[in-house]
Image (cartoon, coloured by chain):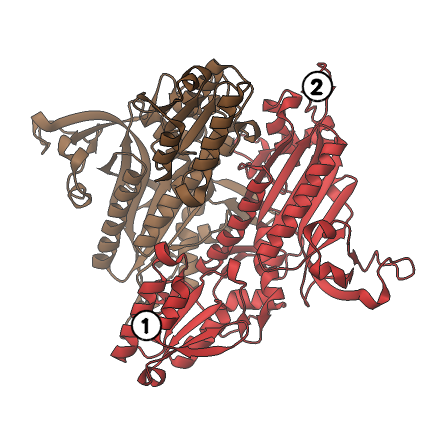
Chain colours: A brown, B red
Amino acid sequence: MLFSRFFAPTSKDVPSDAKIVSHRLMLRSGMISQAASGIYCWLPLATRVLDKLSKIICEEQDRIGANRVYFTTIQPADLWIESGRYDVYGKEMLRIKDRKEGDFLYSPTNEEQATDVFRKYVKSYKGLPTILYQIHWKFRDEIRPKFGVMRGREFLMKDGYSFDIDFCMAKKTYENVFKSYVATFRRMGLTPVPVQADSGAIGGNMSHEFQILADTGESTLYYDRKLLTASDNELMTTYAVTDEKYDPVNSSIPEKDLLMSRGIEVGHIFHFGTKYSKAMNAFVLDEKGNKLFPEMGSYGIGVSRLVAAIIESSHDDRGIIWPETVAPFDITILNLHRRDSHCCEVADEIYRAVSLRASSGREALYDDRDISVGEKMADADLIGIPWQIIVGSKKMERGVVELKNRKSGEIIEMSPAEVTGRFMS
Amino acid sequence: MLFSRFFAPTSKDVPSDAKIVSHRLMLRSGMISQAASGIYCWLPLATRVLDKLSKIICEEQDRIGANRVYFTTIQPADLWIESGRYDVYGKEMLRIKDRKEGDFLYSPTNEEQATDVFRKYVKSYKGLPTILYQIHWKFRDEIRPKFGVMRGREFLMKDGYSFDIDFCMAKKTYENVFKSYVATFRRMGLTPVPVQADSGAIGGNMSHEFQILADTGESTLYYDRKLLTASDNELMTTYAVTDEKYDPVNSSIPEKDLLMSRGIEVGHIFHFGTKYSKAMNAFVLDEKGNKLFPEMGSYGIGVSRLVAAIIESSHDDRGIIWPETVAPFDITILNLHRRDSHCCEVADEIYRAVSLRASSGREALYDDRDISVGEKMADADLIGIPWQIIVGSKKMERGVVELKNRKSGEIIEMSPAEVTGRFMS
């Protein structure tokens, strides 16, 4: 991608209403543009990150046999009246009248619609287990949207719903999702911390939040240092707790292993049994022909929130530091001296070589803009692509370019052929 | 993917309110589930087709340098008041009050928001040309939603917006999009027919619809048979006309080459000049520092509508016939005799081999369900995956399986190794 044709309107200005670093960096790097309070347009750098996150999520959901669907953003109120949540949900639900004065709403979550789809089609216990999930836009009319996309009104979320024959199988599904969430967040370069949680408006009796560690997080977490190196299975029993629940006297964490960090919630899973299947009369017939109400759970990941959370957990004074698996591009090539024909030739050739996706599998952003050396380097650090290949006149006199790692800051000189070879393997 | 774990609730019943074949087939193959009038949940077979369509669209948009974004589904009314369209849009616009009594709407199209994003960030003529596009959900509150997802209220659309320095450049962009649309539809296995169009509510002075040929289409098209084999460039000047505009006396089409077909509109492109840039004061500075209002165009593809349109143009009495490039799976493997251990062994092995995506790049749906041979074969034809590998006891006695092409109906016997080899290359 040529930067001169790419819509990433970077800026030096820090908007005064942007209180947290991810909000400031997303605005400054031209990732988002506010449309209204808590409602943001996602510009190309950000859509690329959303794509990377979604792809990882889908792959891990596939692995546990979950079925991807699209529920609808606009839903009839009837479903919510049936479950009993229409009146209790409160003002966070965006209620809508259509042209025929029918009552609708913009879906804030989909327990009702998932249950409705299930009951229409699954009539026998043989259809269990079933997991339906989607990655889709939702709306919650927060009274005080804040922190950019961290607590927005319109947001992208992965939400999944499971149907099982009994509690024992439902618990197994819950554990599979638990482990798949750990794998999902780890693939994104994050350290997930599962925390036992209350189930709130969703209801139910088994629930965990997934927090990721970030100094600017809204929660305080107490946890055992073993958690940082635990396997997926070990994590199931090595829970952390939030400060409201931390009890220093009865904690099972040895004092020498106790760590305290700030965290950001990026996922939440619930088991709630037959709450919705019973309320909505969603049953299957068991082997003897008796009605059986499936045990259900629901499983959420805040996809758009993750973009901000990753930035909170991975940045420095100069800008974003994307983990390699979720970066909008793998490599950025900086042609520092556009009027030096040798620089242009070398930078062009490197770009051609590394951006031939078929052979390298990698994507490159080539900064060919007519701006100063300082601006170009500042933008590269701001946008935070993991690898920078810097082509400048001075170094070219000695036949070398620089390969800079955004995270470590390490710079290595090498020949154009070497740098190309490195990313073609 | 194992069919026993895959959520595709097929059915023999033809719902009485489903008037057109695509609607019937989408319901019968378990692709969609109605949530309300004109509002559908998309089940796994359908999400896979939407993905394939979206991927082709994105690749072709990339090729013309368009930048992918997400505009917002919920938009402030202010933007539409500014353009003058808030009052004229009528009841098709779903109008919404948020909790603070602010006026919002569910975006039916995005000329306003695209212009708003542009004016916030692009200040110089050097930022031209720019094309922003998205693939996103929209809502139009049709008074009579009908034909399933063909004319729904909530729908997935690709919409793009271009900004150019003058009419000459805007025309070039328009032509590039025109050609890219032809390529896009052809990659989907369709025959696109560009038709000169009125620009309706969008406004403007250059506009084409893209129709695809289907016997059940709502429009009647008159066109030159040359159009069916025309290159992308030739199509620019070989327009067809709809029946309202067809004038047999003055038509330039020689009688011997005149064809008449039904068509379904799947895309629409508009050039509308400075209508929105002027109304919304979206200007850049030219080389001399004078205000310049960009010439704009907008470009739409009905992505969810395409799913139905493709089915209308490609089906038979038994079900859907997916073009290979947009099929939900490339191959389906039918294990006809689940209790025959040899059949199971062979079918399992074929599935393992062809579904190793890393080596074959192909995706397979393995029908391992415990249902009758007849049902299995009927479902395979109904769902319409391009290739069926049929493993049955009788044929296995001779060491062969059947490879059936869904479109031609041709069946070839071959050894399991041969059939695997065919899809591994």
The x, y position of residue A415, in whole percent, is 37, 26
Q: Dot 1: few (<14), some (14–19), or many (≥20) neighbours within 10 Å?
A: many
Q: Is residue B97 left or right of residue A50?
A: right
Nearer to us in this view, B366 or B361: B361
The x, y position of residue A408, in whole percent, is 29, 23
- Check disc 2 and report the residue beneath it: B286
Classify mark 1: helix, strand or loop: helix
Question: Marks 2 and 1: in contact by CB < 8 Å?
Answer: no
Location of residue A241 by image quarter? top left
In terms of sequence position, does the residue under pointer 1 or pointer 2 come before the other?
Answer: 2
What chain does badge 1 belong to? B
Residue at the (61%, 56%) spot, across then down? B186
Q: Please state which amino acid type lies under the numbered disc 1.
A: Ala
Q: Is residue A353 left or right of residue B294?
A: left
Q: Dot 2: few (<14), some (14–19), or many (≥20) neighbours within 10 Å?
A: some
Q: Please state which amino acid type lies under the numbered disc 2.
A: Asp
Residue at the (60%, 47%) spot, across then down? A98
CA gap, disc 1 to disc 2? 66 Å
Residue A279 is tagged as: none
Location of residue A201 by image quarter? top left
The x, y position of residue A46, in whole percent, is 46, 33
- Check disc 1 and report the residue beneath it: B347
What chain does badge 2 belong to? B
Residue at the (50%, 53%) spot, across then down? B52
Nearer to us in this view, A174 or A401: A401
Q: Is residue B393 above or below residue A313?
A: below
Residue at the (76%, 63%) spot, across then down? B225
Q: Is residue A116 left or right of residue B253?
A: left
